Image: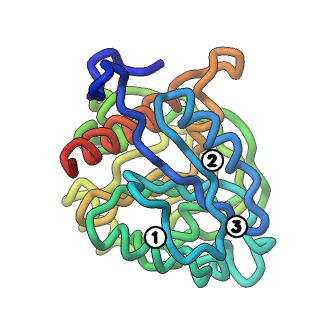
């Protein structure tokens, strides 16, 4: 699954960027994210939430899905105070690539690294199924392997995945191209305003999405469309690493 045109090291092998996966108490998709990233050509060590620093040569960071701190108070509201989040925030502020998946998306909104908020699903029920998505923007570091308007099939599994922003903020984000991923028409599983499934920060280096791309990288799971998202991140991390050398 590694891109044959990827940056190579002195031995002719594709450079494997370092993309740590942060683990909070209650994370349960960290190993899935780790395995998916490694299959796509990255090194993805798991980093514990009490670590105060990210590993040296970190090229990108992933906050995985799960139920950090049991989703007490609000999903992600406690995890955002973990020591590692100070390092993640500093990394993002410096232009580093950060991806939040499901609970990781919730953590990023609670930390103020992404706009909007995640609320309980409109159905007030937990939803777990494949959903159809539309890649709104193929120019971001997280969707570069997609084509604009491409339909992707990636599973969701959440109870608090309804992304909310008021009308003014939604219009501002759409105009700025920050709503990078949308549920296809009629496929919105949670009531997210504007059918938004994923959003970018203003700088375009932080992205959060509710669907789980790490569960859609193997044909045995029914779809490999998640590899387009995670593979885009690996590509961007590899380029970032090469530019820093």
Q: Is residue 200 left or right of residue 18?
A: left
| Residue with the mark numbered 1 | 88
Residue 203: where, in percent of width, then height?
23, 63
Q: Residue at x 33, y 66 (%)?
A: 170
Coloring basis for residues: rainbow
Q: Residue at x 37, y 68 (%)?
A: 91
Q: Residue at x 58, y 26 (%)?
A: 217
Is residue 199 visible to us here? no
| Residue with the mark numbered 3 | 24
| Residue with the mark numbered 2 | 189
Q: Residues within 10 Å of mark 1 (few under 14, many from 20)?
A: many
Closer to the camera: disc 2 or disc 1? 1
Q: Residue at x 36, y 43 (%)?
A: 142
SS of the residue under disc 2: loop
The residue closer to the viewer here, 72 or 131, is: 72
What's the distance in space between the residues labelled 3 and 1, CA to CA? 13 Å
Please, which residue is most extreme toward the front here?
Answer: 11
SS of the residue under disc 1: helix
SS of the residue under disc 3: loop
- Vertical placement of 239 versus 8: above or below? below
- Vertical placement of 63 versus 154: above or below? below
Q: Number of marks in the image?
A: 3
What's the distance in space between the residues labelled 2 and 1, CA to CA? 29 Å
Q: Earlier in the sequence, mark 3 or mark 1?
A: 3
Residue 99: where, in percent of width, then height?
46, 54
Q: Is residue 25 left or right of residue 136?
A: right
Q: Is residue 175 left or right of residue 173?
A: left
Tag on residue 239? none
Q: Residues within 10 Å of mark 2 (few under 14, many from 20)?
A: many
What's the distance in space between the residues labelled 2 and 3, CA to CA? 26 Å
Residue 145: where, in percent of width, then height?
33, 29
């Amino acid at each position: 699954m590694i891109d044959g045109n990827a940056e190579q090291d002195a031995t002719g092998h594709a450079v494997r960027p370092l993309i740590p996966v942060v683990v909070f108490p209650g994370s349960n998709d960290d190993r899935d994210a780790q395995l998916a990233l490694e299959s796509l050509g990255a090194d993805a060590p798991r980093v514990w939430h009490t670590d105060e620093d990210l590993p040296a040569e970190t090229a990108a960071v992933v906050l995985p899905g799960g139920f950090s701190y049991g989703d007490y108070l609000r999903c992600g509201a406690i995890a955002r105070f973990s020591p590692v989040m100070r390092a993640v925030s500093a990394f993002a502020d410096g232009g580093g690539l950060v991806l939040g998946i499901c609970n990781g998306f919730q953590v990023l909104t609670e930390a103020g690294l992404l706009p909007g908020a995640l609320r309980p699903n409109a159905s007030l029920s937990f939803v777990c199924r494949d959903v159809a998505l539309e890649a709104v923007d193929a120019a971001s570091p997280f969707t570069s392997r997609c084509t604009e308007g491409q339909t992707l099939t990636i599973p969701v599994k959440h109870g608090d995945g309804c992304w909310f922003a008021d009308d003014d903020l939604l219009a501002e984000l759409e105009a700025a191209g920050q709503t990078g991923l949308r549920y296809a028409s009629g496929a919105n599983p949670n009531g997210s305003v504007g059918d938004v499934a994923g959003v970018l920060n203003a700088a375009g280096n932080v992205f959060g999405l509710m669907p789980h791309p790490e569960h859609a990288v193997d044909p045995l799971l029914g779809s490999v469309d998640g590899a387009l998202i995670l593979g885009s991140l690996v590509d961007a991390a590899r380029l970032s690493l090469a530019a820093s050398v």
